[in-house]
Amino acid sequence: MITLTLLHPIQSVPVQSWCFESEPVVRIGRSNDNDVIIYSAVVSRHHVELWNHGNAWKIINFGANGTYVDDRPIAQVPVVDGMTIRLGNSGPKIRIRVGATNQPGKITRPPQRELRQKDEVSKDRSTAGPGGVGIIEDDEQGGLTQIDLD
């Protein structure tokens, strides 16, 4: 099992998590055919793949803006439990956990905020609502917006 957690760009707290139990490949990028969809100007349509080789996972970069571990660009590296990757040198960060860290097949999110009036929501470019399948998009000010798809 592998769990990917998108981190807030400033506070490095979890924004959204995806858990995969038995997939041989997990794809991350802007395109809708990825397992993890992240809309950001620095994220390629097919940015990075995580390959499951038995008990070990490997990260392979396909992004034009690179994938970074500890501020160093990588082409392909083994996954280490708890590591954080960055998509592009200034893009979103994803923490990777390997092992039974979540329930299989579940997408988890932080607790939802109370819904506010429409003008307040659009002012800070964030969304709130019931849990479900969604995507994350960055806005002009570098904030993150969750778009629920269900």
Image (spheres, rainbow, N blue to C red):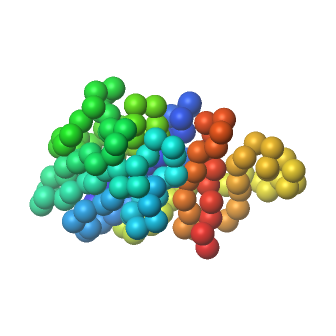
Residue 111 in view of the camera = no
Q: Hey, which residue is sitting farthest front in the picture?
A: 64
Quarter of the figure that contains the N terminus: bottom left
- Residue at 46 percent across and 55 percent down: it is 30
In depth, the one of 124 and 128 nearer the eye is 124
Percent coordinates x, y for residue 124 in the rendering: 76, 42
| Label tally | 0
Q: Quadrant of residue 27?
A: bottom left
Residue at the farthest left position = 54
Please name the residue shown 25% across and 68% down the image: 22
- Residue 112: x, y in percent? 67, 55
The extreme bottom residue here reads: 150
Instruction: Name above or below for residue 102 compared with residue 64.
Output: below
Name the residue located 84 percent from the left edge and 47 percent from the top edge: 120
In the image, what residue occupies the spot 35% across and 50% down? Answer: 47
- Rendering coords of residue 95 (x, y %): 38, 42
Q: Is residue 127 left or right of residue 135?
A: right
Looking at the picture, how far across and down is residue 18, in whole percent?
43, 58
Q: State whether residue 52 is above or below residue 92.
A: below
Q: Is residue 65 left or right of residue 73?
A: right
Taking the image as shown, residue 104 lies to the left or right of residue 60, namely right
Q: Is residue 112 left or right of residue 74?
A: right
Furthest toward the top, the residue is: 71
Q: Is residue 130 visible?
A: yes
Q: Quadrant of the C terminus?
A: bottom right
